[in-house]
Image (cartoon, helix red, strand yellow):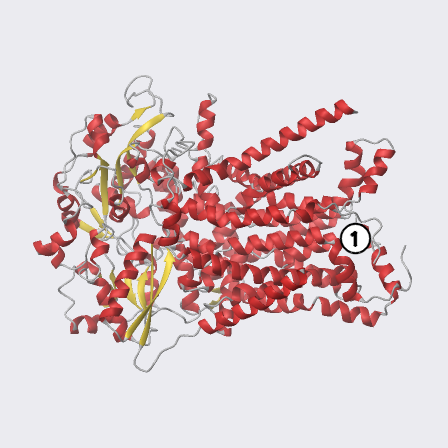
Amino acid sequence: MRSRNKIATICIYTALLGGAISCLIPMYWLIRSSFMLTEEMFRLPLILFPKKIRFQNYVEVFTMVPFAKFYANTLFVVTLNILGALISNLMIAYGLTRIEFKGRNLMFSLSIGTLMLPAYVQLIPLFLEWNWFGKINTFLPLIVPAFFGNAFFIFMLCQFLRSIPRAFDEAAFMDGANYPLILAKIIFPLAKPAIAVVAIFQFMFTWNDFMGPLLFLNDMDKYTLAIGIRTFISTFYTPWGVLMAAATLTILPLIVLFFSAQKYFISGLTLGGIKG
Amino acid sequence: MKRKVFICICIIALIGTGLCLANGQKEESADQVTLEYIYWGSPAEDAAVKQALAEFEAANPTIKVEPMYLPGDLDGSTYNAKMKALAVSNSLPDVGYFRPEEFGNYAENGYFLKLDELMARDGMDDSYLPQTWLKINNATYGAYTAAECQVMWYNRDVLKEAGVPTPPTDYKNAWSWDDFVTYLKMITIDSKGLHPDDAGFNPKDIARYGVSYDLWSTMYYPSVWSNGGDIIDTDGKTVHVDTPETIEAFQNLADLMNVHHVMPRMTGGTNVSPLTMLANGQLGFYVTGQWTLLDLGAMKELNYGVAALPILKESAQIYVSGVNVVFNATEHPEEAWTLQKWMMDPSKTLDLYTSGLWMPTKMSYYTDPEDLAKWLDNDVHPEGFKEAVVDSMAVSKNEPIMIKNINQIWGDYLNAAVESIWIGEKTAKQALTEAAEKIRKSGLLQGSY
Amino acid sequence: MSHSKKMGFNKKRQTLWGWILISPLCLGLTLWVAFPMGLSFFTSMTKWDMLGKAEFIGLKNYLIIFTQDELFLKSIRNTLYFTFLSLPLQLFIALAGALLLHSQVKGQRAFRTIFYLPSLIPIVVSSVMWLWLFNHQYGLINYFLNLLGFDRVQWIDSKHMVIPSLTIMNIWNVGNIIIIFLAGLQGIPNDLLEAVDIDGGRYWHKLRYVILPLLSPIILYNMIVNMIKCLQLFVEPYIMTNGGPVNSSLSFVLHIYNNAFKYGKMGTANAMAWVLFLLTMLISLVIFKTSSQWTYYEGDK
């Protein structure tokens, strides 16, 4: 048994290392380039480690565009989006999977159906709608929709919730609980991995979304990071070094967040034996 | 504990929302006017424009300008998407840049202010190059922002090392195409130092190229015109793509890549910039738009020069630029026009010209030696710039933006046809003849504005 | 195990709570979906450039795109090629990756973060980065190929290799899918796995009889969602190849975008969008219907 385990372990590590390297190489290239002059980035033979580390690029990120403001704006929009996503999607998925009522399947199908719409075509009508509300050039169009559910997350949470045995719900009913209580005390803790996924994904979607801010925001002061980065890519000559610096700054918080949110995945949740 | 954090975030968010909503209102006092100015460009251009706008505000205390900046991209689709959204929702800016290829469409639909009376009143007619003003049905609706064209930069050190003589700067007496190709072969070497005509030359392993042409629609015109060909007639109805002259022009360019191996195949607008290659000594010549001088000038270590474009049959040049317009929907046409005039006046925005981004549209900046020196006499503009570039504008033809559907003709038919020539899949004759037939049958030839 | 009197609540209360809980969804569907879809469908029956007036022409757009627009059919073919190439590869590699990351190895946290890194990079930046990687002349990939003695390959510059190149990019990006699989693996009770051990089974048995069945709802989810994402391929061809070379990477949505924003043919663009919508629904229905054969829901009894 021991030797087989060893071989298996070696295989696993090799595969993991291989995958890790292929993911790290582009990251390394990104960070390396953020410290170089644009011309040096593309020179052959490849410069693996820049001789002169150029911190100037990072300074220019903040002087060329109001990058700090982009950061603040993005944090603001992202936080609200996560809030909206967590509240609405769990509620909706719970309703769709744990409660029997007429019309449930129809609503589920409608929700999935919205996944299939190409987003770009919806943008102009959405723009018209918000214009009618008079809220163009505010953050509202970027925030409010998150509170109304997102088929991507609803579908995912539904699949997760359907894996949780009904026995828990039934036990709780015996003890006299009602629906909201079950949702809060039983389902929520059990679905933590899925919820963590929702939070992380929503963070990422919003952090990197640029089509929305492009259409709904007019003032550069309100721009988020995603569209802010776009401003570096100019018609013919892009200051790549500065762009890479900006990109690195954009990615850093995501990495930190992700690394620390890991515990929701690692804390081995066992489903057996939990009573409400 | 977590719950408290949750609630805190909610409260912060709500307050923030409130602040944002409050920010969305525009405040205008009785005599203060606010204008929205829309524009695009690289961060360097953004800085220069903002500077000019700030100086305008200082000179006109009752007018405040809100800049609406969009990231620049090659085909303007970012701008176009935004503009469509703004147009549909009746929230257009007051004045600013506009994409040339959409100009005719929007003008015909009445989106721009008619400028003729204002121009006559302020004596603008004569002081600007006649090509500057854009007319639809004999009424002026816009002005070209600058006088841009095609140029050929080169790396002095590379040419010296390859033993190539200094290229001529007189546009009337530039190199012939055959001479040009010969010199390109002298510059091009593979990783073993062999030239394209040497035995054992490996076209798959080239270390330094002779030339790179920017391969997109606007940049083809000068070569095509230089050979006596054309794409679509200015009447918007006759297709000239399959004339022998046009075919030869495209074949010449393709041969640079596939036969002589002196030009790399570049696809995509954001690929490794030929400017970078030029700076790294991996390229000898670079044929591109004049506006790249802005970034070229910033490369202090590069020893660059300008050369006259090679002549196939006759000298040719293109006049291309973004357009400045005043939107009809503006509530303050007089102030908007004042801002427009300001941005068109080189003396108010001199940085944009000295840095190499633009060439002026005001006539005195070409005819008056003092004004000429104001924007040409600096480190950025290389020796010979006047003879090679400025003077060549005398033979320049406008980019054909007034032909209806020209964008779609390029997008649906010509781009693909031309690409198939570059990758060697078809000869220029095959590709262009097929494309011409398809265009004629497409129903897109609807004349011009 | 079904009770005749479910959950101790009567039907009325269930219905009430059901609708209350999904009320955001209903409102959302009305506000953000019904209106845009309605407008989109109406527009698809007009000829409109968004500047002038819309001209109602019925279903003509639909006819035209199928009979006269050869790029339309090409874009469908390109997109389907991409989808059927990428989807199985992505799912397989993601599942393998998730299983690897789930096993008890040292540095789990670090590995997971590393595998997820590619998805964190803004797509605008990663597209540009891959342009450089794929560059025929100076790209990293060809550089290594050269070092190993192989010839340089035309990646996105070649008609034949451009879709496979985009596939490679997509596979590099499977971090998202891995995370969802991981979350699913997390929910598999250990006692079931132990039971297999006790019965003398090996990893292969665990996989076949416990892990895969319990993971099947998630597999279905990833299949559907990523199929939709593949069909809606847009940003990479938009930034990297503009549909080239010679329209071999013109994806469905890119063609829609060009028609809407570059050529001002909103009616046509919307008609194409509806065709895409119907196509997506069709494929999803097929997957859903056949899924009951192989998916297993623990909580559905």
Is residue B11 found left or right of B32 in the rendered image?
A: right
- Up the image or down, B372 lies above or below C109; here it is below
In the rendered image, which quarter is residue A186 located in?
Answer: bottom right
Find numbered disc 1 in the image and state the secondary structure of the residue it sits on: loop
Number of marks in picture: 1
| Residue plotted at (43% across, 68% down) | B88
Q: Residue furthest bottom?
A: B30
Q: Residue furthest front?
A: B1
Amino acid marked by disc 1: Ile
Is residue B55 found left or right of A144 in the rendered image?
A: left
The residue that mark 1 highlights is A164
| Residue plotted at (28% across, 22% down) | B195
User: What percent of the width, then of the height, locates residue C287?
Assistant: 70, 48
Is residue B250 found left or right of B78 in the rendered image?
A: left
User: What percent of the width, then of the height, locates residue A181?
Assistant: 78, 65
| Residue plotted at (61% across, 55% down) | A116
User: What percent of the width, then of the height, locates residue B54?
Assistant: 28, 65
User: What percent of the width, then of the height, locates residue B264?
Assistant: 34, 33
Closest to the observer, C90 or B3? B3
| Residue plotted at (86% across, 63% down) | A173
Is residue B38 found left or right of A228 in the rendered image?
A: left
Q: Quadrant of the N terminus of chain C?
A: bottom right
Closest to the observer, A98 or C244? A98
In the rendered image, is residue A76 in sight?
yes
Closest to the observer, A84 or B401? A84
Q: Residues within 10 Å of mark 1 (few under 14, many from 20)?
A: many
